[in-house]
Amino acid sequence: MAPVKVYKNLIDGEWVESSSGRTFENVNPANEKELVGIFQKSNQQDVDAAVAAAKGAYKTWRLVPPPKRGEILFRAARTLAERKEELATQMTREMGKILDETRGDVQEAIDMTFYMAGEGRRLFGQTTPSELRNKFCMSVRSPIGVCSLITPWNFPMAIPSWKVMPALVCGNTVVMKPATDTPLSMYNLVRILEDSGIPRGVVNYVTGGGGEVGERLMTHPDVRVVSFTGSTEVGRRVSEACSQTFKHSCLEMGGKNVIMVLEDANLDLAVDGALWGGFGTTGQRCTAASRVVVDKKVYKAFMDKFVERARSLKVGNGLEPTVQMGPLINEGQLKTVEEYVEIGKNEGAELLTGGKRLTGGEYDGGHFYAPTIFGDCDPKMRVAQEEIFGPVVSVIPCDGLDEAIEIGNGVIYGLSSSLYTRNVNNAFKAMRDMETGIFYVNAPTIGAETHLPFGGTKQTGNGHREASTAALDFYSEWKSVYVDYSDSLQRAQIDA
């Protein structure tokens, strides 16, 4: 066998080993005996060096004209597109989701990079009339400084691209930390940015655990911005850490998303959506449709189709072309799913399919779990309230749209929701009344596009949004500029 590659940190334009002298292994969740790579187990000293490099590079990067910054991103986008299949294959090996999905993950990075490359020639501000004569008023965007970007394992290239591309085009410098389960995909993204002409120190990449690396990235005095995607529990710690020195923080956290199926819905389409929303990425999406609320008039017809289709899903190694659902990311996540399935049983939810780990044969050495559906759930059950982050869907019967909306809103999260109906009035009512940052009609709760804001309400986030021009508002600050060419003192709001 070929020797396993050892990957290094990128600090100030140099690929270097951690000062700790320690490393960790990245394994394939479909077969933990397969070693994907060896990465640096970094410490505070490595983070400090990376932040210092980013701080130094900021002095010149902020002065690079935004169209020139955009040209670098454009070159990166073209390289991502050229290498899409290779990058997707490597991502499936380290993360587990099927190739169709990892291709989509890379495509999202391509889309975001092209999009933000174009923003290099926009970054629009406003001009507006003054209340005084011979005076000009405008607003412009200014970069902020060093940004810490802390990303999860479920979208290991798409989510880093949501953060790094708007940060760079606005003129900031970055230190990026991937999840320890998926450092290779971010490595590939960073390498492509480097090859596309990003100056040294502008992008830095440090691998390691949340305790040593993540905590320091939240608290370092020279970091001005922290963008975090992960659990609500950790997000709360990020918020508290940033508040001490008033750092900007963007938090994208949990979800308990709902698909609502009304009596007039196209049931076959709704079943397709529930399958893709609930079991795509093995349910390991913050936008996963882990709840389905179905009108009692069509509940049995829907459930017969939904359960039958879930049972037929082929689970296995995501590199196999016939596989429809891959493994969970690691043993810890699988145990979490097992614990929640027991909770659901004890609460009285009806286990209709799944509810077991898959073992033996092709499943040996992997973290596989059967697609699981609970029926006749009470909306207050823990399996219908708490984020599980696995292939478990709770189905709740309801009486009509109003109760569906009430159930849908009855959780602490507010990321994504969906309604299946042929009635345009109901669609617009739900669109208005659902307390979520994303809403779909006749589509599942997943499938966000890069040119619209991404994020949620309540305990899903802290009010900021990823993607689209909304991301520019987070990675830049507004500066209002007044130019008085009257050659005399004019006093705003003071009567002449």
Image (cartoon, rainbow, N blue to C red):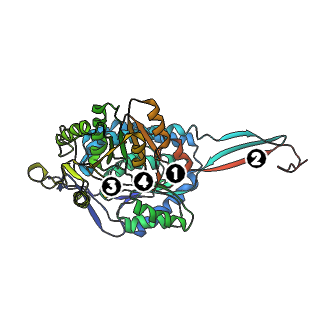
Q: Are marks 4 and 1 in contact (CB under 8 Å)?
A: no
Q: Are marks 4 and 2 in contact (CB under 8 Å)?
A: no
Tag in front: 1 or 2: 1
Q: Mark 4: which amino acid?
A: Tyr
353 shown above or below 41: above
Please give the residue where the numbered disc 1 appears in the rendered image: 464
**In the displayed structure image, the side of residue 147 where residue 81 appears, left or right:** left
Q: Quadrant of residue 403?
A: top left
Please give the residue where the numbered disc 4 appears in the rendered image: 413
Q: Are marks 3 and 4 in contact (CB under 8 Å)?
A: no
Tag shown at residue 279: none
Of the numbered discs 3 and 1, the one sitting upstream in the chain is 3
Q: CA distance from mark 2 to mark 3?
A: 46 Å
Q: Residue 485, image x and y in percent?
A: 83, 43
Tag in front: 3 or 1: 1
Q: Mark 3: which amino acid?
A: Pro
Q: Mark 2: which amino acid?
A: Tyr
Q: CA distance from mark 3 to mark 1?
A: 25 Å
Of the numbered discs 1 and 2, the one sitting upstream in the chain is 1
Q: Residue 445, image x and y in percent?
A: 37, 42
The kind of secondary structure element at disc 4 is strand
Please give the residue where the numbered disc 2 appears in the rendered image: 482
